[in-house]
Image (cartoon, helix red, strand yellow):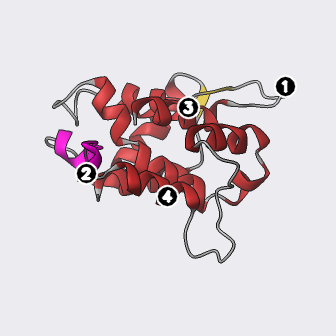
Amino acid sequence: ALISSGQLMSFGNLSSKDDMITRRNISLAFSSTLLPKYFPHGSWCSFTASLLPGLCRAIDDCEESDDNVLLQRTISNIMGSTCTTRSTDNTSSHLVEWVDTLNDVNRNITIPSLASFAEGAPEAQSMVDKIEKNGAFVNCQDADTDYLATTLMTSLNR
């Protein structure tokens, strides 16, 4: 889960040559703002792995993800197939279905819930605001607010 999560986190790291602002990957955005203050339990690795379900949901909800060739190639490599993020009936994402199969008792794989590492964390929107303020402070641009919120909320509410 950690490796897959890390590979998907680079989705927010690509910027055009015209950008003067550095784009920061999702793991760096979350960990530099929220660790260890709001999530003191667990390690950086377990924190990063716990973001995988939220990243999968955020990618599924992001319409631009279908047009991102690098992201689609990364998803195919992670899943070991050539499927895209959207199923043909648009009821759910292959990526979301895939991450759900990872958290299987029979396979002895468990992706921890982000909430299991929390202590004294404020409301999710407040944490997203802090991530955006941290990005502005270090002069970087993160993924958009909805993407950050979806990643955080899905990872917390598993």
The amino acid beneath tag 2 is: Asn
- C-beta proximity under 8 Å, tags 2 and 3: no
Task: Tell me the quadrant of the picture where the N terminus can be found.
Answer: top left
- C-beta proximity under 8 Å, tags 1 and 4: no
Quarter residue 21 falls in: top right
Badge 2 or badge 3: first in the primary sequence:
3
**Front: mark 2 or 3:** 2
The amino acid beneath tag 3 is: Gln
Q: Which residue is mark 3?
A: 7
Residue drawn at (57%, 60%) of the image = 94
Q: Which residue is mark 1?
A: 17
- C-beta proximity under 8 Å, tags 2 and 4: no
* Residue 134 visible (yes or no): no
Q: At numbered mark 4, what does the secondary structure look like: helix, strand or loop?
A: helix
Q: Which residue is mark 4?
A: 96
C-alpha span from label 3 to label 4: 15 Å
* Residue 115 visible (yes or no): yes
Q: Is residue 106 magenta?
A: yes
- Most extreme residue toward the front, as rendered? 106
Residue drawn at (39%, 40%) of the image = 130
Could you tell me residue 112's position as x and y percent? Answer: 25, 43
**Front: mark 2 or 4:** 2
Could you tell me residue 124's position as x and y percent? Answer: 33, 53
Quarter residue 80 falls in: top right
Q: At numbered mark 2, what does the secondary structure look like: helix, strand or loop?
A: helix
